[in-house]
Amino acid sequence: MKLLKQFGIILIFTFLGEVCKYLIPLPIPASIYGLVLLLAALMTRVIQLEQLKEVSAFLIEIMPLMFIPASVGILNTWGVLKGIFIPIVIITVVTTVFVMVVTGRVTQLVIRMDKRRKS
């Protein structure tokens, strides 16, 4: 029952993200609105981290299963993708490396700022 309550909280923020997408005419996905609202609720302590801890761990554990439908979809459209496969692979590798580098640099910056603040 606890997992259902926690999952319900996440669904409420997902719904609020959909409402924001409907009301705000910006090209931002509804899921991003929902994540920002959930982050704001966590930072303002409207929602406590403990209220979402178990369901978050569960969703992270099953995340690989969520990629199966996308993989099957790619296999079904192979005829269309065959002609542009090499550019897609190059773009994917370059952007993945770029995201990893930027994420690492931002993480290092946050760690340095946290150390300065503590000392």
Image (cartoon, grey):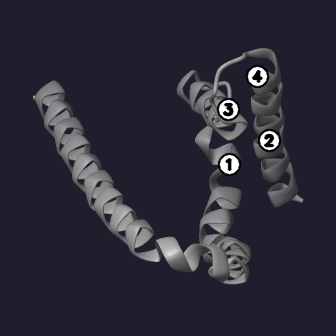
The residue that label 1 is drawn on is 52
The residue that label 3 is drawn on is 47
Q: Is residue 7 above or below residue 35?
A: below
Q: Earlier in the sequence, mark 1 or mark 3?
A: 3
The answer for how far apart the CA atoms under marks 2 and 3 are is: 9 Å
The residue that label 2 is drawn on is 9
The answer for how far apart the CA atoms under marks 2 and 4 are is: 17 Å
Please identify the quarter of the rendering in which residue 36 is found.
top right
Q: Are marks 1 and 2 in contact (CB under 8 Å)?
A: yes
Please identify the quarter of the rendering in which residue 30 is found.
top right
The residue under the point 48% across, 71% down is 84
Which of labels 2 and 4 is toward the front? 4
The answer to which of 38 and 46 lies nearer the viewer is 38
SS for callout 2: helix
The answer for how far apart the CA atoms under marks 1 and 2 are is: 8 Å
SS for callout 3: loop
Q: Earlier in the sequence, mark 3 or mark 4?
A: 4
Quadrant of the frame with the N terminus: bottom right
Q: Is residue 76 above or below residue 5?
A: below
Callout 2 amino acid: Ile
Mark number, residue 75: none
Q: Residues within 10 Å of mark 4 (few under 14, many from 20)?
A: many
Residue 46 picture location, percent across and down: 67, 24
The residue that label 4 is drawn on is 20
The answer for how far apart the CA atoms under marks 1 and 3 are is: 8 Å
